[in-house]
Amino acid sequence: MKELDGKVAVITGAGSGIGAALAAACAVEGMRVVAADVDAAGLETVVAGIASAGGEAVSQHTDVRSRDALEVLAERAWGTFGGCHLLCNNAGVMVNKPLLELEEADWRWILDVNLMGVVHGIGAFVPRMKAQGGEAHVVNTASMAGLSAFAAMGLGAYTASKFAVVSLSEVLAQELAETDIGVSVLCPGAVVTRIHESDRVRPTDLEDAAPSSLSADANPESVPGAQTAEETAQVVLRGVRENRLHLITHPEMKGVVEMRHRAILEAFDSAAADR
Ligand SMILES: NC(=O)c1ccc[n+]([C@@H]2O[C@H](COP(=O)([O-])OP(=O)(O)OC[C@H]3O[C@@H](n4cnc5c(N)ncnc54)[C@H](O)[C@@H]3O)[C@@H](O)[C@H]2O)c1
């Protein structure tokens, strides 16, 4: 989708970090923005910031774990701005525990937000975007942890959720190939945000009963080469304009992905040699 000016963007997880930066960047491009999050105060700040810069944005309290909430969000977008041309399924949370320490509540929370949030966004919006006609684009936020398995920092559940987002985005791109709806999957390396403080929005019914044994610092700011959320937002907008499927923020991490894929290809070679 080359032309963004005058179009409508709906962004989940827009109350902080990458989503907030995306909302601001879309508004700068002349898009009208529907900012969605469970963080009401964060949303208020983001919408006020866009308005004071001369842009147009509204907020909608949305828990992406609920399909009904995504339907309400879609109704808000169509009711307020008459449609949606850019859907960013971006809300996400992180848990830092080794696999054997993860409880069902950890899994439930991370999969319901990181994976089912994207599933619900696609389910509620894409049929409406198809019916609306014309160019549109879906961006699903995964992670570099969706392209390579990181045991460090107890990212097992997070990694599983992000691999799922990458694969479902690749399938969605194929399924929508004959339409005017493009699909991208954002795979950032470290970005300076509040992702390491995800517990601030953890639902009380899924509380963390047993804290992680890990003492690793999960703050992305401490990772060398961490970029700003504003830089990440620009990678997204370029990817939308150029209809790129995989959006990479840290090209220097190519070797990590190569290593994983090489190991898989070598397994094929071993299987062939075993025949
Ligand atoms: N920061 C990084 O280094 C990094 C790297 C790769 C991928 N990501 C991904 O980027 C996305 C954005 O995260 P961020 O880094 O900006 O973190 P962040 O914590 O600053 O922002 C995430 C936002 O999602 C919201 N959210 C959480 N649960 C929600 C729910 N149930 N419904 C609606 N909103 C909810 C939070 O309130 C918050 O505003 C996430 O999907 C994350 O996994 C981040």
Image (cartoon, rainbow, N blue to C red):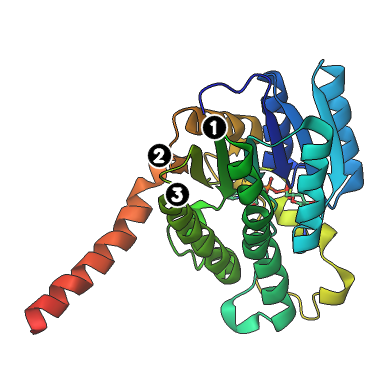
Q: Secondary structure at mark 2?
A: helix
10 Å neighbourhood of mark 3: few (<14), some, or many (≥20)?
some
Q: Nearer the viewer, residue 18 or 168?
A: 168
Asked whether the viewer can see residue 128, the reply is yes
Which of discs 2 and 1 lies nearer the camera? The answer is 1
Q: Is residue 70 left or right of residue 123?
A: right
Residue 123 place in picture, x, y as percent: 64, 57
Residue placed under numbered mark 3 in the picture: 173
Q: Nearer the viewer, residue 111 or 196?
A: 111
| First-in-chain label (3 vs 2) | 3
Which of discs 3 and 2 lies nearer the camera? The answer is 3
Residue 10 place in picture, x, y as percent: 71, 39
56 up-or-down from 91: above or below: above
Which residue appears at 10% of the width and 76% of the height?
272
Residue ranking furthest to the top: 54
Q: Are marks 2 and 1 in contact (CB under 8 Å)?
A: no
| First-in-chain label (2 vs 1) | 1
Residue placed under numbered mark 1 in the picture: 135
Residue type at tag 1: Glu
Residue 136 place in picture, x, y as percent: 57, 35
10 Å neighbourhood of mark 2: few (<14), some, or many (≥20)?
few
Residue placed under numbered mark 2 in the picture: 251
Q: Nearer the viewer, residue 207 or 113?
A: 113
